[in-house]
Amino acid sequence: MLTLKDFYEVYDQHQDEYFTQVKEFSIGHKYFDFNSRTAILGVINLSIDSWWKHSICYIPEQTIQRAKVLHAQGADIIDLGVEATSKNTARVDELEQQSQLLPILRTLSNQKILTSVETYYPEVASACLKAGANVINYTGHEYSEQMYDVVAEHDAAIIICYVPGKHAREIEFDPNQTQDLISLIYDFLAEEVEKATKRGVTKIMLDPAVGIAYANFYYQHQSKSNRFSDQLKILLGSFRLKKLGFPVFNATPSAMEIFGEELRSAQVFSSVFAALGGSNVIRTHETAKVKAVLDTLRLL
């Protein structure tokens, strides 16, 4: 069982890195003081394949209304995705992604609501940024240089995910390959940061992608509870990625096999680990509850 001693050991082994300051910057009309306040990305899924069913929106009007609600609840940015990241879900081509996203992005941009688009297609990213998106949540690796060129051209922000494969659905990942997953993730992201900055990208967030990689390793993993345990350990240790100079971004993982009917509590629980691990940005389907957690931790 996890104890206070375990938390201390993580800190004690890397305490010189724990208080590392990261770059702060503006996204759209808003300045993000990442070193003093954790930002929240509220999630809206446009894919009917998403297993987080309560966050699915089926028509543009519903999506826009949901975005307003999340914004009012405390989401700094609304994250939109047309294609679910699970390995066995249906693929959505570039044209279909654009047809669904562009009208929504134009409306939300006019209403001064910041948006992020999850995609691995540079063509989709370009069209979305022109339509008013502010951040690209890049869940790919195959077209990195083209994606970085697009982001730099628009002076946009990008979330660079740990994706050891072509994209989120084709990940070559085995959590048993090393005892120190953070070092593995660090080396991958360091290489991507170098490529991105050389191509003119200045606004970067670094995502260990604990949800993507583990979700697609799920069916091969012999112990499902170990999956969630490893995810939480990565959340606790992700402050080590701050040495790369940019904000650390974490998506709060879930564990249906543990939480069962109380699944929606899983992300609230894991947000505590993300916060203690120094996350500068947290992505969640449970905006209001995670904001309450963060507000409470600031009081302590």
Image (spheres, grey):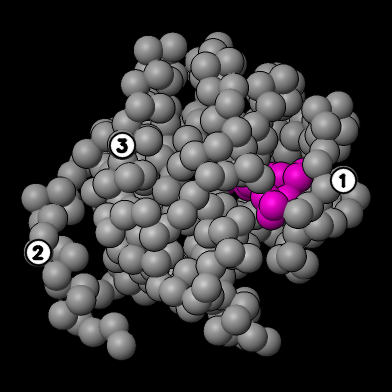
Q: Does the magenta run of residues contain 269?
A: no
Kindly identify the amino acid type of the residue bearing the numbered disc 3.
Answer: Asp
Residue 11's disc is none
Viewer-side label of 2, 1: 2
Kindly identify the amino acid type of the residue bearing the numbered disc 1.
Answer: Pro
List x then y, in percent, for residue 83.
76, 45
Would residue 278 be seen by someone viewing this image from the given angle? no
Q: Are marks 3 and 2 in contact (CB under 8 Å)?
A: no
Mark 2: which secondary structure?
A: helix
Q: Residue at x 56, y 52 (%)?
A: 212
Mark 3: which secondary structure?
A: helix
Q: How far is mark 3 from mark 1, CA to CA?
A: 39 Å
Q: Establish if 178 lies above or below 145.
A: below
Q: Residues within 10 Å of mark 1 (few under 14, many from 20)?
A: some
Mark 1: which secondary structure?
A: helix
Q: Residue at x 40, y 19 (%)?
A: 195
Q: Earlier in the sequence, mark 2 or mark 1?
A: 2
Q: Is residue 73 shown left or right of residue 60?
A: left
List x then y, in percent, for residue 16.
9, 50
| Residue 262 location, quadrant | bottom right
Q: Are marks 3 and 1 in contact (CB under 8 Å)?
A: no
- Asked whether 197 or 211 is in front, the reply is 211
Residue labelled with disc 2? 12
Would residue 229 be seen by someone viewing this image from the given angle? yes
| Residue 98 location, quadrant | top right
Residue 187's disc is 3
Residue 60's disc is 1
Kindly identify the amino acid type of the residue bearing the numbered disc 2.
Answer: Asp
Q: Does the magenta run of residues contain 83?
A: yes
| Magenta stretch in the rendered image | 75-87
Question: Which quadrant is the C terminus positioned in?
Answer: bottom left
